[in-house]
Image: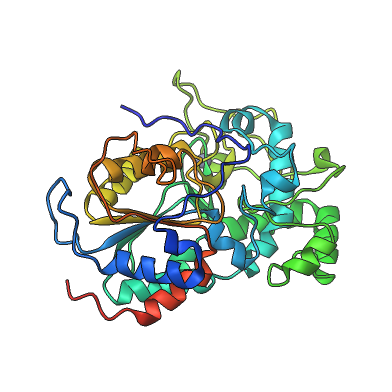
Amino acid sequence: MTSPAIRIPFTGPLPPALIIPPSAKTIAGAIDAVSAFFTSPPSFHLRGVDVGSNTQTVLLTGAGISVASGLSDYRGDQGTYRRNTSYRPIYFHEFTARHEARKRYWARSFVGWPGLVSARPNSTHHAIRDLGAKGYISSVVTQNVDSFHSVAHPDLSTIELHGYLRSVVCVSCRNQFSRQEFQNSLERLNPAWAEFLARMVEVGALDTRNPEEQRKKGFKLNPDGDVDLPQAPYSTFRYPSCPTCLEKPPRLKDGTPARVEVESDGAWLPTSNAGILKPAVIMFGENIDPAVKTAAEEAIDDAGRLLVLGSSLATYSAWRLMERAYKRGMPIGIINVGGVRNETMLFGDPELGLTSKLGGTATGHVRCSHPTQDILPTVVSMLPDNPR
Ligand SMILES: [Zn+2]
């Protein structure tokens, strides 16, 4: 059985955040509530086998935690969907079927890349590292494609649910190549664009360390690593083919050899029917790798609690993991600025006296609406090592 393709998440405004317990409204109250969440004994309601991690927490992280690194999120005040209401991420079938769509995608990605490369993990990623060192974290599942987790805490298991931007992958032969080397090829194939980009870098328009300056100059790095470039002449953009497929064209499904043709300098020609490189991220309409999906589910099943950081759970794959944790009887914590998809269905509504519609029995949930960097670094500094 294959996993369901990623569907386009709804982009409309979410309802206001629930606050659980009510004291978590203030930063100090939220810090206390999150500390208690990490240190409370495993829930009596947990189902499944204890693989020795029931005193530990699995994290599920989203774009909200990378905002402090200069990247946009999707649904925050300055989020991609708020600033540009016509923004629509590219679909997998569009990317693979249309040369023009790929030109546009790679042009925007080309301009976004230097900003992404210069962006660094922030205090939330470092707090996660320190929580891991103190024994509180079993693993991290992330929706982010920015690789900040693996940079900040290489020793803590991280499952990248939606892939990563640091590589490109061939749609035909599935070989992966470095995105930085791909950037060098794009630069060589697009001298006019490279000059434009060099100018942007020079004036600091792509400097993720200075989001204010970036905003003034009209650029904002989207969480997928691209930037909006209104009116740009995308049709002039050129990109290389997969080097492996160029050297040895793969077979098509009917067994005949595929055609991989390039210009004399290596730019992919639309007379080809293979050798297309795409970013190693899961695009909308594309399936999550079944092995990655299974690893994420196992990460949920192996922990005693789930803490969601900086995600509104708007994508179905993230919501499903949360639902799985809930049904397993795990206490759920959510630190996210603003509303979260279906959260009254999950937690009920304490003010209205409504109970959860998911039918779970777990207690000990925490929900607050503060930036993670205002909560987690203080929490980890206060906690002793997890005795386990
Ligand atoms: Zn290939």
> x, y (%) of residue 325?
29, 46
Image quarter (top left, top right, bottom left or bottom right) of the N terminus: top left
Q: How is the image coloured?
A: rainbow
- The part of the image, by quadrant, that contains residue 259 is top right
The residue at 37%/66% (across/down) is: 33
Residue 296 appears at what percent x and percent y? Answer: 33, 48
> In this image, 238 relative to 280: left or right?
right
Outermost top residue: 254
> Where does the image place residue 334, in percent across and percent down from the top left?
42, 55
| Residue nearer the viewer, 244 or 39 | 39
Seen in the image, is 267 located left or right of residue 54?
Answer: right
Q: How many marks?
A: 0
Instruction: Kindly give the residue lying farthest to the front in the view shown.
Output: 352
Is residue 344 at all visible to an observer of this figure? yes
Along the line of sight, the residue nearer the viewer: 340 or 86: 340
Q: Depth check: give the residue in front, 177 or 46.
A: 46
Q: Residue at x 45, y 18 (%)?
A: 254
Toward which corner of the image does residue 358 lie, by quadrant? top left
Q: Identify the residue at image location x=22%, y=53%.
A: 302
Residue 58 vs residue 27: left or right? left
Please identify the quadrant where the C terminus is shown. bottom left
Residue 60 showing in the rendered view:
no
Q: Which percent across, then down, holds residue 275? A: 57, 37
